[in-house]
Amino acid sequence: MSVRHPIIAVTGSSGAGTTTVMNSFSHIFRREGIAAQVIEGDSFHRFDRAAMRERIRLADAGQGAPISHFGPEANLLAELERTFADYGETGAGQCRRYVHAGEGAHAGCEPGTFTAWARMAPGSDLLFYEGLHGGYVGPGVDVARHVDLLVGVVPIINLEWIQKLHRDQKLRGFSQEAVVDTILRRMPDYVNHICPQFSRTHVNFQRVPTVDTSNPFIAKDIPSADESMVVIRFADPKGIDFPYLLSMLHDSWMSRPNNIVVPGGKMGLAMQLIFTPMILRLMDLKRRAQ
């Protein structure tokens, strides 16, 4: 952790909705005039798309250990920790970008590949990470210890699968069988490397649908925000103004001393109310340390 160069990380698995959270933080940064250095977890994958597909093909053929983007073998987690450590110490570090499908060529790189590593632009107020491993801890690697505000995005598993099935089929053109194969391949890494991160987060957001999702593999639609509730869990409830949150977030209630439940459509507002004072506190500590 660093007072002078704070780091915020949003962690959640593929299809969890971390991009929605990223947009909420972007609104806060813009409104409060905060310059954020943004990095995506995809940029720390070890292999580009073609190389990863080949690794998976070989593993499926029994010519290598199983591999998925959820596990350490497919990611540069030591490099991610080094980036966090460098930023916390100096306010800079090395980063690159993974070019997604639909973005076209980026800096001369085709979708599915990486841009070259480059020095971060100077002058940022904080580092914002969104990806799979913001709270990762493993042999010789401790990413979580460098993070000042760690946020988990964790829909219940059936909803997470529904979101992934719809996204990968409609936006990426995969068959349902291919998406299910990916879900099954990732499950051991999900259990061993993704789930443990949510016990390290400062705040968790878990969306729970209020419609039947018993069989996610036949769902025709993703449950909407209005068909959901969001359980928000605080690791340390001290300093959280729950009466204020309840007064601002109508139809909300507390289910435990450190949990508040809000209507799904108010998730964005809840993030604004919860994280704005937290971020402003980080900025105040930063100014005092300079």
Image (cartoon, helix red, strand yellow):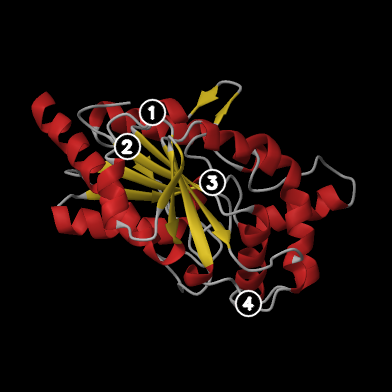
Left or right of residue 121: residue 42 = right
- Residue occupying image coordinates x 68% and y 53%: 52
- Direction top: furthest residue: 140
Q: Is residue 140 visible?
A: yes
Q: Which residue is mark 1?
A: 146
Residue 183 is tagged as none
Q: Position of residue 21 (x, y in %)?
A: 40, 56
How far is the residue under mark 4 from the one under mark 1? Answer: 38 Å
Residue type at mark 1: give it.
His
Residue depth check, mark 4 versus mark 2: number of the one nearer the observer: 4
- Residue occupying image coordinates x 60% and y 72%: 222
Q: Which residue is mark 2?
A: 7
Q: Earlier in the sequence, mark 2 or mark 1?
A: 2
Q: Earlier in the sequence, mark 1 or mark 3?
A: 3
How far is the residue under mark 2 from the one under mark 3? Answer: 16 Å
Q: Is residue 142 above or below residue 123?
A: above
Q: Earlier in the sequence, mark 4 or mark 1?
A: 1
Q: Is residue 119 visible?
A: no
SS under mark 1: helix
Q: Nearer the viewer, residue 68 or 209?
A: 209
Q: Earlier in the sequence, mark 4 or mark 2?
A: 2
Q: Which residue is mark 3?
A: 132
- Residue occupying image coordinates x 64% and y 70%: 168
Residue type at mark 4: give it.
Asp
How far is the residue under mark 3 from the one under mark 4? Answer: 25 Å
Cβ–Cβ under 8 Å for marks 1 and 3: no
Q: Position of residue 79 (x, y in %)?
A: 48, 34
Residue type at mark 2: give it.
Ile
